[in-house]
């Protein structure tokens, strides 16, 4: 059953949400988390891994770019965080970060089977 307002490419690509134990695992499957390399027990974070569904990752990153672009028009906790990140890191890193966060939110929405409720 397709949820109203839920992106159908994501719903189609994921299929069974129980395949992922948490939102980070789903974001890693989409290629939205930093690649890790460790030696001697010291982890090193590299660029995003870019694995998984290219089309879905592209949609999430474009959505993240849109959110970053309009963040200064809103004054809430999430948009203030995005504005600060945008000032420190430029435009592309916040877009991927927001895409990662949105993928984790999508995992939570699909897992709990409840509509999204924004934090205070």
Image: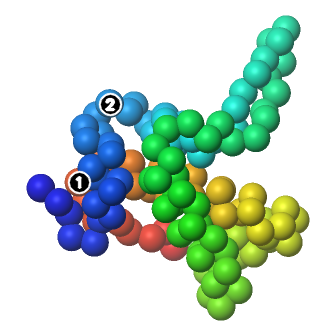
In the image: residue 116, left or right of residue 58 = left
* Residue 58, x across and y down, in percent: 54, 57
Residue carrying label 2: 19
Q: Nearer the viewer, residue 54 or 76?
A: 54
Q: Residue furthest bottom?
A: 73
The extreme left residue here reads 1
Q: At which x and y percent is residue 61?
A: 58, 61
- Residue 84: image x %, image y %? 80, 71
Mark 2: give few (<14), some (14-19) or many (20+) Cα within 10 Å: few
Q: Furthest residue to the front? A: 55
Q: In which quarter of the image is residue 95?
A: bottom right
Question: Please, what secondary structure does the residue beneath circle 2 have?
Answer: helix
Q: Name the residue under label 1.
A: 113
In depth, the one of 25 and 108 nearer the eye is 25
Q: How crowded is mark 1: few (under 14 residues within 10 Å), some or many (20 or more)?
A: few
The answer to whether the residues at label 1 and label 2 have Cβ atoms under 8 Å apart is: no
Quarter assignment of residue 66: bottom right
Q: Which residue is drawn at 70% across and 32% down?
A: 35
Quadrant in which residue 68 is drawn = bottom right
Please tell me which residue is depicted at 59% across the width and 45% down the height of the picture: 32
Q: Is residue 46 left or right of residue 21?
A: right
């Amino acid at each position: 059953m397709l949820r109203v307002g839920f992106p159908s490419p994501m719903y189609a690509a994921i299929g069974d949400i129980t395949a992922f134990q948490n939102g980070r695992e789903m974001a890693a499957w989409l290629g939205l988390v930093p690649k890790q390399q460790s030696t001697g027990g010291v982890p090193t974070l590299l660029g995003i891994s870019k694995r998984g569904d290219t089309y879905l990752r592209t949609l999430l990153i474009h959505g993240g770019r849109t959110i970053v672009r309009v963040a200064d028009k809103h004054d809430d906790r999430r948009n203030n965080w995005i504005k600060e990140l945008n000032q420190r890191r430029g435009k592309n890193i916040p877009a991927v970060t927001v895409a990662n966060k949105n993928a984790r939110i999508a995992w939570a929405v699909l897992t709990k089977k409840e509509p999204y409720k924004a934090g205070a």
